[in-house]
Amino acid sequence: MYMGVVVGSVVATQKATSLVGKKLMIVQPINSKGEPVRFEEVASDTVGAGIGEKVLFVRGAAAHRSFAKTPNAENDVTDASIVAIIDQFDK
Amino acid sequence: MYMGVVVGSVVATQKATSLVGKKLMIVQPINSKGEPVRFEEVASDTVGAGIGEKVLFVRGAAAHRSFAKTPNAENDVTDASIVAIIDQFDK
Amino acid sequence: MYMGVVVGSVVATQKATSLVGKKLMIVQPINSKGEPVRFEEVASDTVGAGIGEKVLFVRGAAAHRSFAKTPNAENDVTDASIVAIIDQFDK
Amino acid sequence: MYMGVVVGSVVATQKATSLVGKKLMIVQPINSKGEPVRFEEVASDTVGAGIGEKVLFVRGAAAHRSFAKTPNAENDVTDASIVAIIDQFDK
Amino acid sequence: MYMGVVVGSVVATQKATSLVGKKLMIVQPINSKGEPVRFEEVASDTVGAGIGEKVLFVRGAAAHRSFAKTPNAENDVTDASIVAIIDQFDK
């Protein structure tokens, strides 16, 4: 899992059927000091995350499983999902 | 998912059977400012993306699922697919 | 597998159902000299690791398998797990 | 998928049974200008690629699927395969 | 697949059941000149590799398949395995 901050969303009319109705958020990965690391990615939101919120996101099969019980999951192209909104870091 | 811009395509006569008929686009990953990040990758096009267009692409099993209902999917070697054409970034 | 040191944990009220009850530890990857490499990740703890301890963590499907026998594993979103506490490096 | 140039091969007597009879090529990833990027990897050849040729290679499950119909595929350890020889880049 | 040199091993008393009895080797990735690249990883040994030996290692599902026929493979947490000892590079 990766920590990130939501910085925006992607608008796309022409896309895979399985992405219709999903919110495609732009996430800047961060460390636990809130500093940006690596590069922005795009993740499907599953928890109602808004711009500016710190989140946890996952990649790969785990992201797919967050949509495991949706229709047509067998051809879902999700490879990144926001799975939690971070309240705070305990250190 | 990753943001990218299509910069060209790959011509390959000798290739895995499962790649025949697929458009193999060269994608330069970008951030939401449109700046290049990391290095070029090659992704199978599923949405009719042309050179110069901004796209979303996915990696791994998700890319494979974009061809889940094609013949011989069980030996498909796709590990990256373009799954959306980006209209704009909302920030 | 990657070596890391636990530096904290993530508190998240709003999260995927499959993360409820899991301890989400912040792990700083290290090399065998104990020096930090790359960037912090977040991993579900399966061995009772505490802050300051050196651990092994895994990514992807392997992390998911560490929860293979838990309820609702089919929609578990774990993509990183702590699977061992490191006693020492033999070199 | 990634672009690369074949720079050599690996000779290994002691290896997983599933690698016996596979050509293990050393591939230097490149961009579409032919410039080296990142670091060398080793990929099983499926298209008869020779030293100096530009190729496409894939990682992970996709590489495994390139050997999906071979004997003992269920314990095949391939995680990277050369799947095409590049004739040219169209840009 | 990646080239590496074995630099040590990890001693861990408290670990996932599926790791008991596996040799957890610390591997420094290298290129075909023998130069170190990226950072150390830890891989389960399947070929009897010793410290100082050059090896091939794999990640992800391929590493898991190297233990496909062991007991309790369904909850095996291996995500990296040493699958060959390198005799030489042909270039």
Image (tube, coloured by chain):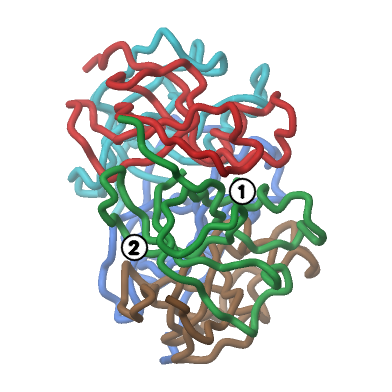
Chain colours: A green, B brown, C red, D blue, E cyan
Indicate the position of residue C13 as horizontal and vertical percent values: 54, 39
What is the x, y in percent for residue D68? 69, 50
E35 or B86, which lies in front?
B86
- Mark 2 or mark 1, whichever is nearer to me: 2
- Which residue is most to the top? E13
Chain letter for mark 1: A
Q: Is residue B31 above or below residue D38?
A: below
Between residue D34 and residue C70, name the one nearer to us. Answer: C70
Residue positioned 39% across, 73% down in the render = B29
Q: The disc labelled 2 sits on which kind of residue?
A: Phe
Q: Quadrant of residue A88?
A: top left
- The residue that appears at 49% across and 65% down in the rendered structure is A42
Q: Residue at x 70, y 62 (%)?
A: A76
Residue C24 makes an appearance in the image: yes
Q: Is residue D10 left or right of residue C14?
A: left
Residue bearing mark 2? A39
Indicate the secondary structure of the residue bearing disc 2. loop
Q: Provide the secondary structure element on which disc 1 rests.
A: helix
Q: Residue at x 56, y 51 (%)?
A: A60
Residue at mark 2 to residue at mark 1: CA–CA distance: 21 Å
Instruction: Please state the horizontal and vertical placement of residue C78, each as a whole percent of the image.
Output: 56, 38
D39, above or below E63, in the image = below
> In the shown orientation, is residue C70 left or right of residue C7?
right
Check disc 1 and report the residue beneath it. Answer: A61
In the image, D72 versus B82, the foreground residue is B82
Which chain is home to disc 2?
Answer: A
Residue type at mark 1: give it: Ala
> Image quadrant for the C terminus of chain B?
bottom left
Residue B73 as seen in the image, left or right of residue C26: right
* Residue A6 higher or lower than C26, as above or below: below
Q: Residues within 10 Å of mark 2 (few under 14, many from 20)?
A: some
